[in-house]
Amino acid sequence: MSDTENATAEQNTEILPEGASVNLQEEFEQSQVQEVLDKLDRELVGLVPVKTRIKEIAALLLVDRLRRQFDLTSETPTLHMNFTGNPGTGKTTVALRMAEILHRLGYVREGHLVSVTRDDLVGQYIGHTAPKTKAVIKKAMGGVLFIDEAYYLYKPENERDYGGESIEILLQVMENNRDDLVVILAGYKDKMDRFFESNPGMRSRIAHHLDFPDYSSEELEAIAELMLSDLNYQLSADAKKALHDYIPLRMKLPHFANARSIRNALDRARLRQANRLFADRNKSLSKSDLTTLDAEDFLVSRVFVEGKLDGDPADGILNPVSMDKTD
Amino acid sequence: MAMSNPGNRVTQGQFSFLPELTDEQITAQIKYALDNGWAVNIEYTDDPHPRNTYWDMFGMPMFDLKDPAGILMEINDCRKTFPNMYIRVTAFDNTHGWEAPRMSYIVNRPPNEPGFKLQRTERDGRSMGYTITSYAADKPEGERA
C-alpha cells in the first residue's frame, strides 16, 4: 500500500517531457486496482451496471493520473457519488470497495469509510449542527464519507429544521476540500431524486450517479450460497430446492430487502436447524450434520405455510439504518 | 537575552528554536501524532508566560481522526479568529502510564512579541528574588491583543 502511495507522490512531482510515453498497463498493474475489482466480482453477485460503472471510474482515474504525468491537468476530478437503490442491494459494500479503489489510485490518502446518517450530522438545537457536522467531516478526511439515507437531511416541511445547515457545510467542504474527502450519498432512488431537486447545489457537485438494480431470484440464490459458504454451512439437495421456491415467494411479500432478507431467512434456517438437532440430542452428530441445512429448516417458514412474513421485524424496513451497515 | 534570542521569540514546546513550521511540516507532525493514536487539540492564549498552563481550547479535542487535513482546517480557523495570539497544537496520549500530552508546539504567534520583564526583589540579608512578567500580559485580559 505504501508502495502505491510513494509511486503517486513521485508522479506528482515529476513532469514528463512532450515526447515521452507512458504505459497504461504498467500503471494499472502497479495500482493493484484489479485486485479490488476482482474482490468486488467475487463478493457481489450480479450488479453488472454498477460494476461496469466502477470499472469506468477506475479507468478514468487511471488515465487522469497518466495525464498528470504530462502536466495536462492539475485539478482533482470531482469524485463525489450518489448511490441509489432499494435496501439490501449492496450500496455500503460497494462504497467500502470504492474507498479502497480510490486509495489505491491515490485519490484519498487513508481509504477508510465513515458511515453516517442524519443523526450523526444534524444537531438538536441551534448551534449544535455545525460542530457536529464538522466533527464528522474531520473524521472522514482522507477517506470516504458515506451518508446513508441522505434525503433525510433535508426536510422541506419543517422550515426550522437544522438539516439545511448541515447540507450547506457539506457543500462547502465538497467544493473546497476535494483533495481531502470523497462524499458518497445513498438512498432510495425516488427520494434521492426529490432531494436533488430541492438541493440543486448538491446535484451539480456530484459527478457519478450509480443506480443499484434489484436482484433477480437466481442472483439471490447465488448470494445465499455465498453467504452460507462464508458461514461454513451447506444446503442439502432438498434444501436447495426449498430455497429456490422460497425466494420468489418472499420477493412478493412486503418489506423485501433483497440480500438482507435472504440473510435473515438463512439466519432463521440456522436457528431451526439448531433446534432440530437439539430436539434429538441423544443422537451422535457428524460434521456434516452440523453444517447442513435441510429442506425442513426452510419449509416451516410462515412464508410457505401462511404466505406471511416470519414474525421478525428485522426482516422489514423498520430498522434500515443499523441494518445497512452489515450487508 | 536579546543577544541569544533576537526578536524576543517565545521558545516553548517543540520546534520553538527552529524557524516557523510551514503548514506542510505541521501536517506531517500531526500525521505522526495521529499514527500514534494520540488525540490532537488546538489551544490559544495571549499570555506567553512559561508558567501559564491555562491555555483555552479552540473547539473540542479531536478524537478518532485519521487524516491531518481536518485539523489543519481547524488551525487555520483558529488563526483567523485569533491572529494576534499564541496558538499551539498538543497531542494527548491516553495510554495507561502516560496519560499526558506527548507533543506540543506553537503554530501561531503574535506579530509583535514584547518579551519579558525581569523583576528583582531584595529580601532578607540582601538576598535577591527574581521573577519575570510578560509585557504582553500588562493589560487586562480581553484588551491585550
Image (cartoon, coloured by chain):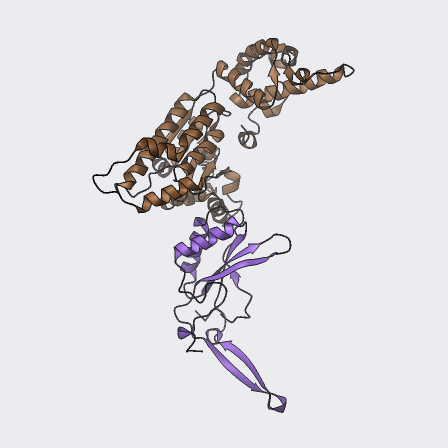
Residue that extends furthest to the right in the rendered view of this protein: A282
Q: Quadrant of the N terminus of chain B?
A: bottom left
Chain A as rendered: colour: brown
Please name whichever residue, A62 or B56, is drawn nearer the observer in this view of the structure. A62
Query: In the rendering, at what x and y percent does residue A326 appear?
Result: 55, 30
Q: Quadrant of residue A62?
A: top left
Residue at point 64% right, 55% down? Answer: B97
Q: Quadrant of residue A246?
A: top right
Q: Is residue A50 above or below residue A107?
A: above
Residue that extends furthest to the bottom in the rendered view of this protein: B125
Q: Is residue A280 above or below residue A173?
A: above
Q: Quadrant of residue B84?
A: bottom left
Q: Is residue B122 above or below residue A138?
A: below
Residue B19, visible in the rendered structure: yes
Query: In the rendering, at what x and y percent does residue A144 appear?
Result: 45, 39
Residue B61, visible in the rendered structure: no
Number of residue marks: 0
Q: Is residue B127 above or below residue A186?
A: below
Residue at point 27% right, 44% down? Answer: A15
Residue at point 51% right, 17% down? Answer: A222
**Is A80 displayed left or right of B64 in the figure?**
left
**Is B142 displayed left or right of A49 in the figure?**
right
Chain B as rendered: colour: purple
